[in-house]
Image: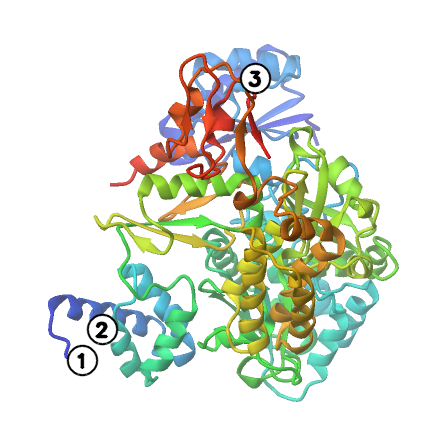
């Protein structure tokens, strides 16, 4: 694939920095992908291709690893990613009602991004703060002891 | 030497200084003198208490009262209240983080804190506080007085069993790795605590990371490893950060790296992060992940002790297993073996979650009963409801009913009862829980996290999930229960790893103890706990309804009709069973059947 857009060139640059950070070692593939995912919000095709060529690892292997782990996104996400804990302790503490209210307020279903590109809603496995369930994470912020009534105020904080 | 009954430490960091902390200190000294307390209360300055944005701040010891935002006018009153009357002034105390309070409370009588002993008490980002609590003294003892075989014997004698869930004797595992052929050996800490409901390891990594580091260095010495990894799940960013800081500090103090304590033992430690895959808590999948591959388990033998990371002998243990080691060395294996039951020695951390009043972390000696945990430590069931079941061991664990409340908690007892110890999650469920829904819930999780490598797990759990979902939706068929039992047996027998083998457990154990609920769903199309939406109806009781229209106005799908002051009616075809009408009704007129 020809790297011909400016965006692609930026993606390649980010990929390069990540590979350099981990000394181009094959076994550091996951930290490298993590760095790209953190910097760009997802792992674009151009970045994956470049990592493949620098590490001498087939693209199929790269894609196989990137698609295996839940925290890697291979598609662009919304400006803000909401991760809602769907695990048993949060569920038992009333998580179902909160999750339904959240989907209603955002008008999107889990695994998708809103039309205006603002929100991506996904479910996440246990975040380990079960004592304050139900729990959700918006970008890096964790919210606990959630009730449906709190949701509008929390969502309003994000541009 | 003067003996003071109390010390006041006044923060002298630049931020506090700017806000006049030295004036505060002067005033404190003056007031203490004015009250004739200068022989009893010492005022000292100290760097960095911590809440810099809310200075001036002081801490009063021995109680540890942390006062913030102090003003000069407060000092006279503060001294009189705190030191003459012995009453802390609540309004000036630093608030405790609500999350911290809910996670790790003051221990009750039945609790014994070994692994959690420093959590919440020391600053995890300050190695000196760990050292002050006998930190690294065990390592010093080991390196100066014990041979690797001595160390392995000590751990064997203590009876420590792997705290990750399998409960394999830790000393024996160390022995295997030590005996394996090879010059390069590794030590790995499994900090991929993926069990929903478990956050014990997170608390230790965030609150007392050095206990884990010290345990790992001792293990490395015992087995002859020169490199170690802490594999921590990425969902724990604070833990990752805290551990990295701790490792750096240990390096700076010569406790990691070349020639530790001046001996010829060298050991390096690094952090590796997961990327969101529950299966990476399985030891061979974890190893694959560190090697930069998909987290897929592989068959054993060979076991990691013989051929693990990069095909070298590798010892993998859980966070909690390592955290116990320094104390076992310092206090001796007999002290450890004196706690617990005949085959389960020592203490175990558990994370209490669900419908219990006091959720959070506890650490208790083995042998305590489930009843004591739920009622004496956990404060009983929330809202005064009745106990229905407790799920132990995470998503591959089983659900135990009320008949097992007096079961002593240990590895063998839990297994006999059809559950497992697992890493220590305990989810308490009240009588508003549907056990079929719970089984479906755990199956959904496991199906999602199945790595896909072997057919019994990949396909088998999917089929099981389809069947249980059908049952919850009111489409259960005669023969479904037998089908579930057959599938379960095959999946347990033929799956490649522990995830697959344990996957049917939620169904097996709920079928064992709550078969009648499955039968009600299938044959009567009823959900006794009134949870499964497809099997319940919301009705308005005409005797209780006053026609206030509150329910109709709040219904998201306009399923309720009725005139003011006349009985309202819910249309079952439109109703989505969200329950909002029941929540808003002030007359308890909405019934679920």
Q: Are marks 2 and 1 on the same chain?
A: yes
Callout 3 touching callout 2 (CB < 8 Å): no
Give the image location of residue B373, x and y in percent: 75, 42
Q: Quadrant of residue B169?
A: bottom right
Callout 3 touching callout 1 (CB < 8 Å): no
Cα distance between the residues tagged 3 and 1: 70 Å
Task: Give the chain letter at badge 2.
Answer: A
Give the image location of residue B485, x and y in percent: 69, 66
The numbered mark at residue A1 is 1
What quarter of the picture does the C terminus of chain B occupy?
Answer: top right
Question: Can residue B555 be seen at all in this image of the molecule?
Answer: yes
Give the image location of residue B372, x and y in percent: 79, 40
Q: How many marks?
A: 3
Cα distance between the residues tagged 3 and 2: 65 Å
Q: Which residue is mark 2?
A: A46
Q: Are marks 3 and 1 on the same chain?
A: no
Q: Which residue is mark 3?
A: B544
Assign a secondary structure to mark 2.
helix
Q: Nearer the viewer, mark 3 or mark 1?
A: 3
Q: Nearer the viewer, mark 3 or mark 2?
A: 3
Above or below residue B517? Residue A62 is: below
Question: Can residue B96 be seen at all in this image of the molecule?
Answer: no
């Amino acid at each position: 694939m020809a790297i011909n857009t400016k965006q692609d060139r930026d993606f390649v640059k980010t990929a390069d920095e990540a590979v350099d950070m981990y000394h181009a070692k094959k076994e550091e593939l996951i930290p490298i992908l993590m760095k790209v995912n953190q910097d760009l919000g997802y792992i674009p095709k151009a970045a994956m291709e470049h990592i493949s060529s620098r590490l001498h690892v087939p693209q199929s292997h790269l894609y196989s690893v990137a698609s295996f782990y839940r925290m890697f996104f291979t598609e662009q996400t919304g400006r803000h990613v909401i991760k809602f804990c769907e695990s048993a302790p949060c569920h038992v503490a009333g998580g179902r009602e909160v999750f339904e209210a959240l989907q209603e307020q955002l008008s999107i279903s889990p695994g998708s991004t809103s039309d205006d590109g603002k929100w991506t809603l996904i479910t996440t496995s246990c975040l380990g703060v079960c004592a304050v369930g139900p729990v959700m994470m918006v970008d890096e912020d964790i919210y606990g002891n959630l009730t449906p009534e709190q949701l509008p105020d929390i969502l309003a904080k994000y541009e | 030497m003067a003996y003071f009954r109390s010390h006041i430490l006044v923060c002298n960091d630049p931020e506090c200084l700017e806000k006049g902390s030295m004036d505060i200190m002067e005033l404190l000294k003056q007031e203490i003198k004015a009250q004739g307390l200068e022989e009893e209360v010492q005022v000292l300055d100290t760097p960095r208490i911590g809440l810099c944005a809310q200075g001036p701040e002081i801490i009063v010891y021995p109680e540890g009262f942390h006062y913030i935002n102090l003003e000069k006018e407060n000092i006279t009153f503060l001294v009189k209240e705190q030191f003459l009357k012995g009453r802390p002034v609540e309004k000036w105390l630093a608030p405790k983080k609500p999350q911290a309070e809910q996670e790790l409370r003051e221990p009750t009588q039945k609790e014994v804190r070994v692994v959690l002993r420093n959590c919440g008490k020391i600053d995890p980002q300050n190695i000196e506080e760990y050292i002050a609590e006998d930190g690294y003294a065990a390592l010093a003892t080991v390196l100066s007085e014990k041979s690797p075989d001595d160390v392995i014997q000590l751990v064997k004698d203590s009876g420590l069993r792997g705290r990750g869930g399998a409960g394999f004797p830790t000393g024996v595992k160390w022995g295997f790795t030590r005996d394996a052929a090879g010059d390069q050996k590794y030590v790995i800490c499994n900090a991929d605590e993926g069990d929903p409901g478990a956050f014990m390891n997170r608390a230790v990594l965030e609150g007392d990371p050095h206990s884990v580091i010290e345990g790992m260095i001792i293990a490395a010495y015992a087995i002859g490893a020169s490199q170690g990894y802490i594999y921590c799940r990425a969902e724990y960013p604070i833990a990752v950060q805290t551990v990295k800081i701790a490792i750096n500090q240990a390096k700076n103090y010569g406790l990691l790296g070349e020639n530790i304590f001046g001996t010829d033992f060298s050991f390096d430690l690094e952090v590796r992060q997961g990327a969101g895959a529950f299966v990476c808590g399985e030891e061979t999948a974890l190893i694959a992940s560190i090697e930069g591959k998909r987290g897929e388990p592989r068959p054993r033998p060979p076991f990691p002790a013989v051929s693990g990371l990069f095909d070298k002998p590798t010892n993998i243990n859980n966070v909690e297993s390592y955290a116990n080691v320094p104390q076992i060395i310092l206090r001796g294996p007999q002290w450890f073996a004196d706690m617990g039951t005949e085959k389960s020695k020592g203490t175990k951390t558990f994370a209490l979650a669900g419908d219990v009043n006091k959720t959070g972390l506890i650490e208790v000696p083995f042998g305590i009963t489930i009843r004591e945990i739920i009622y004496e430590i956990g404060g009983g069931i929330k809202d005064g409801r009745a106990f229905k079941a407790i799920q132990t061991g995470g998503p591959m664990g089983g659900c135990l009913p009320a008949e097992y409340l007096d079961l002593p908690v240990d590895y063998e007892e839990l297994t006999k009862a059809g559950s497992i110890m697992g890493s220590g999650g305990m989810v308490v469920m009240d009588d508003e829980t549907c056990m079929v829904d719970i089984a479906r819930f755990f199956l959904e999780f496991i199906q999602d996290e199945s790595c896909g490598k072997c057919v019994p797990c990949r396909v088998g759990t999917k089929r099981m999930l389809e069947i249980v979902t059908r049952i919850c939706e009111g489409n259960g068929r005669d023969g479904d229960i037998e089908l579930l039992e057959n599938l379960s047996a095959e999946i347990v027998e033929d799956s490649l790893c522990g995830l697959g083998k344990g996957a049917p457990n939620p169904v097996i154990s709920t079928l064992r103890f709550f078969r009648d609920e499955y039968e009600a769903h299938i044959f009567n199309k009823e959900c006794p706990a009134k949870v499964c939406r497809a099997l319940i109806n919301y009705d308005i009781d005409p005797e209780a309804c006053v026609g206030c229209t509150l329910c109709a106005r709040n219904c998201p799908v306009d399923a309720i009709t009725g005139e003011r002051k006349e009985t309202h009616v819910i249309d079952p075809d439109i109703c989505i069973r969200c329950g909002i009408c029941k929540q808003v009704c002030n007359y308890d007129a909405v019934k679920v059947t």
